[in-house]
Image (tube, helix red, strand yellow):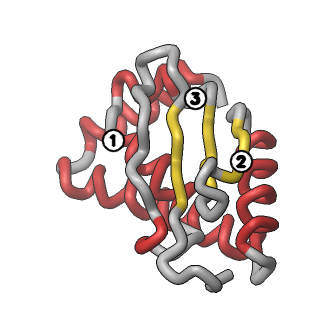
Amino acid sequence: MEAGFALELLDSLRSSLPEDAFQQLLQRQAEGKAQQYRLQLGDAPLQDRLHQLARLRRDEGYVTVCSLDDDGHSWNLQEAHCSVQRIAEEFPTICDQNFYSSAGPFPTAWWNECIGDSKADTPADFGLRRSRPHEH
């Protein structure tokens, strides 16, 4: 979808709906995307699910890399290019929804903070820390 069309559509929705309804619509979309990822990732071991999520994100236009952290136990998903940056500049909550749709397939106890700025040239990192050492 062209960014110009998406921006116009979001702007129309925002002006037509009460703010809380607009935010709920964005939240539902993120939850739906997270559910879609969960179904596609299945019950494979954590490492396999993370690499598959990185592949899915690349297919969607993100430049996503999955790597094992230096600690040898944690995983990082790094996105060096935001395919929705132009939209997110106008609708900052899109970044939050995008993060939650990516992190959603994994237990919230594993989420680490998103590091980076969608408006900067630096990549954003999404880290996962296992809540239990042997959980997959």
Q: Earlier in the sequence, mark 2 or mark 1?
A: 2
Residue 10: where, in percent of width, then height?
40, 35
- Which corner quadrant of the image does residue 44 belong to? bottom right
Residue 127: where, in percent of width, then height?
52, 52
Numbered label tally: 3
Q: Secondary structure at mark 3?
A: loop
On the picture, is 12 further left or further right than 38?
A: left
Which residue appears at 49% of the width and 47% of the height? 98
Q: Nearer the viewer, residue 61 or 20?
A: 61
On the picture, is 130 further left or further right than 80?
A: left
Q: Secondary structure at mark 1?
A: helix
Q: Quadrant of the N terminus?
A: top right
Q: Nearer the viewer, mark 3 or mark 1?
A: 3
Between the C-alphas of marks 3 and 2, the distance is: 18 Å
Q: Which mark is residue 67?
A: 2
Q: Earlier in the sequence, mark 3 or mark 2?
A: 2
Can you say whether 115 is above or below 24 in the image? Answer: above
Q: Which residue is mark 1?
A: 93
Q: Secondary structure at mark 2?
A: strand
Q: Which mark is residue 82?
A: 3
Q: Nearer the viewer, residue 42 or 86?
A: 42
Q: Residues within 10 Å of mark 2 (few under 14, many from 20)?
A: some
